[in-house]
Amino acid sequence: MAKLQGKVAVVTGSSMGIGLAIAERFAKEGAHVVVNSRDKSRAKSTAEALREQGFSAIGVAADISVPEQAAQLADAAVQSFGGLDVWVNNAGINAIGPSTELDPMDFQRVIGVNLNGVFFGSQAAGRIMVKQKSGVIIQIGSIYGEVGMSMRAAYCSAKHGIVGLTKVLASEWAAQGVRVVNVNPGYIQTALDVTDQQTGGYDDSDILRRAPAGRYGRVEEIAAAALFVASDEAGYINGSSITVDGGWVGYGGW
């Protein structure tokens, strides 16, 4: 039996990359999927592509850094499919640069999406899930919620913040049957990584040399971790972080 049969799942930032892989995997496992992007046409076209494969999906445009839009996204799931069982906070951006020169607006923009947006999304989902006394909220964090890296003050601040936020929300909502879990990907080959290489001072060879696994991670591997967390098999996992990084954080060598 499909692991998410009949469940309703929202995946933010799911028109590409990790979010798209999660949306596709959830759909294959029987979920009704709400695809999200800030761009209406991308949200709609991604959902349409899933429906063409025989899956159940709708596309909803929303900027999760705006509380009202996060709430509207949650409401769209309930109105279209009758409930909300899984919410994945995946949407994220980056701004790389020396901390002495980082534009304050860039810092605030990253925090606005990567941390504030995660709270607003969790809050919108939590209000529904707490009332129905069930649900799973999954934060897509980063290994940079566990370690630091030069020129990534905004990104690391946000991802470290998600770790604490996850613990707080899980503690508050566990008694109402709601789980909140953080999934920390390592370096995954996506369009965001390609953009980061342009300003981050690294290339593919640096990742392959540094990662104990000797390769990038695949979006499908993050989707598999998210599926496990969303499923009943992970029913006693709550308030914690699962790192999917090929050994990156565990390696302390040169």
Image: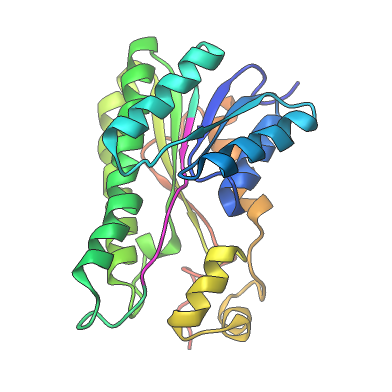
Residue 204 found in image quarter: bottom right
Decide: is 210 above or below 246: below
Q: Is residue 5 left or right of residue 103?
A: right
Viewer can see residue 84: no
Q: Magenta: predominant secondary structure element?
A: loop
Residue lying at 41% horizontally and 59% vertically, measured from the top left: 93
Image location of residue 88, percent across then percent down: 48, 38
Tell which of 85 and 243 is nearer to you.
85
Q: Nearer the viewer, residue 169 or 101?
A: 101
Image coords of residue 16 (percent x, y): 60, 51
The verdict on residue 247 being magenta is: no
Q: Residue furthest bottom?
A: 254
> Where is residue 191, by image quadrant?
bottom right
Q: Is residue 221 above or below residue 47?
A: below
Give the residue drawn at x 39%, y 44%: 240
> Front-most of 24 and 3?
24
When the figure is inspected, residue 243 is found, relative to residue 147, above or below; the finding is: above
Q: Position of residue 83 (x, y in %)?
A: 49, 14
Image color mode:
rainbow
* Residue range highlighted in magenta: 87-95
**Vertically, is 63 above or below 58?**
below
Quarter holding the N terminus is: top right
